[in-house]
Image (cartoon, coloured by chain):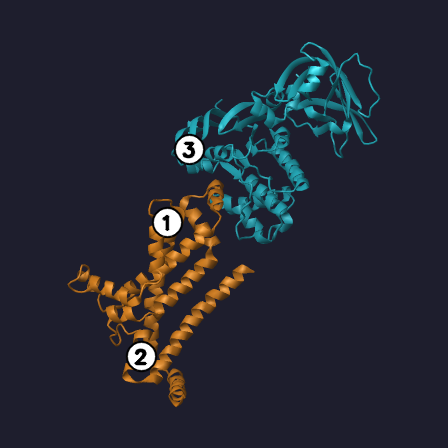
Amino acid sequence: MAPKLSLRDVVVRRRRAEVLRVESLDVHEGEVLAVIGPNGAGKTTLLQVMALLERPAQGEVLYDGARARGHELSIRRRMALMMQDPLLLRRSVAENVAVGMRMRGVSGDKRKARTNRWLARFDVAHLAGRSARKISGGEAHRVSLARAFALEPEVLLLDEPFAALDQPTREALLDELAGALGETGLTTVFVTHDRSEALRLGDRVAVIVDGRVRQVGPTAEVFAAPADEDVASLVGAETIVAGRRVASADGIASVRVGRHVIDGLARDGLPDDVLMVLRPEDVTLMKPDEHRPESSARNHLHGTITRITLLGYQARVSIDCGFPLFALITKQSLEEMGLAPGQEVAATFKAHAVHLIARGPSSVGDRQAD
Amino acid sequence: MDLIWDGLREAVRILRTGDNSIWSITLRSLLVSGSAVLISLVLGILGGAFLAFKDFRGRNILLSLVNTGMGLPPVVVGLMVAILLWRSGPLGHFRLIYTPAAMVVAQTVIAAPIVTGFTAAALRHLDPRLRTQLYALGASRPQMLWIVLWETKLPLMAAVMAGFGGAISEVGASMMVGGNLAGETRVLTTAVMLEVSRGDFALAMALSIILLVLIFAVNAVLTAVQQQEKT
């Protein structure tokens, strides 16, 4: 089956300068493709090309395998785009949600039903009659989400939709978005500069740097094996593995990961199937024969070094503990300890450093655990 | 002072007793200027949207020309239109000179740049991402234009007010291309001029009061709508 949306040999220029070059990028039916990259990397331009809002200087956008050129309006009406700013019109909240459907020729009854359904789904049904100018930023984003989902698009394009919001609101909205995406199974492209958002939502990740797609692949693969230094610094080279909670006590959740039981901080509402995320700089390495000092760190694992990558004054050490674990240490420590691939090593890290998140139906951990 | 008080008293008497010729002049003023404003709205909105949204070489020069056009002296407009519509002029075969249609043309030339300038300014003031968002919601070009105009209806009402004020209060162009013919092309401003030249200040004042009331009424209605929209 042809991908839902494809870019082929796309080049975008602004004032004669090339700002985007994509040889090939596919978005498959039903997947969430997270696009991450630093500011100014060309993420928004990429999304605008996908949304058929910007025509590239060269190349083609394919929709369901067919050239989109010449059919922009009809294809745009099968997609929805949510931007960072909700940009609501000077109308009531309900009219804002309905306006896109009206332009797409959705009948009055259906418009009303979908408006009510999605406003309720995002907990803003009580605002339906209120002027969109008189609601808070968080509420406006909920209305914007309702507006996008009410269109019942085949493809949903999200351009850093919550970047302007404070952390608690962003977290809450991300949860709701993840839930709605799970329910609808919408083909989605999610642009973000926040790798934790990509981790949370993306089935696959495309990393874009300086207008080029540097790496595309399943989220776990890209995060575990960055293709180059830029990608590595963007994805943070984190350890991400699937696990199952086996116990919870005193605010600590014990999670079985392979043959190990790892302690992490328990959050309210955390399900049993979780992903364990660990930043490499939180891992301390010791020689296995060293006397283990008494410490507050709750997690101690043994493994074999598989790879050492030098990153300036730092070294990224890949360890096989039954799952891939990454540690970031200084070059000085590396030399003093005389670490090398094939050696046994002990890794310790605190429960505080272990980030436990809910595992989605198709999340990275499933692949990682393979 | 007596001249003013006597004039005012007489003006009020004329307005109270009513005179068919006064009301026909008033109606003609409204029709001529109303038509000119309507035509200017169509031309000005399309022109303003083009200047606001289209990126092309020479746009700034065109914007400067439109802004200059917002202050065109009516006598100059009258002269240009008269030359064009004069029987031996390039558009003479339409036989429009000294007709209300000629006055509509002249007043449109005065009001259209005002509406264009206001529209372009209002649309350029809009967040450019709004157009992107509307296209992404599935808008065709006319749908997008309709919605952004609806979003800018407050400044656009100011454009209507300014255009109507400019059209109904000008006298030079109407005089030149209309000729101030009784019962045919006489409007409030040209009638005021005529009565002053005749020394009939009372009638001139009565006509001026009607003119002011008309301008006030149109502005009051539009201002009320504007205020309602704001709340």
Residue to which mark 2 is pinned: B21
Q: Residue at x 40, y 49 (%)?
A: B52
CA gap, disc 1 to disc 2? 43 Å
Say if A33 sits above or below B7 in the image. Answer: above
Please, is residue A178 above or below residue B177 in the view? above
Q: Secondary structure at mark 1?
A: helix
The amino acid sitting under disc 1 is: Phe
What residue is pinned by disc 3? A17
Kind of residue at disc 2: Ser
Chain to which mark 2 belongs: B
Residue B223 percent across, percent down from the top left: 48, 65
Residue A79: horizontal and vertical position, in percent? 50, 36
| Label 3 CA crowd tier, 10 Å (few <14, some 14–19, many 20+) | few
Chain B tint as drawn: orange
Look at 47% across and 50% down and name the residue there.
Answer: B126
> Which residue lies most toward the left here?
B88
- Closest to the camera, between mark 1 and mark 3, is 3
- Which colour denotes chain A? cyan
> Is residue A295 visible to the viewer in this orientation of the structure?
yes
> Same chain, marks 1 and 3?
no
Name the one closer to the observer, B102 or A159: A159
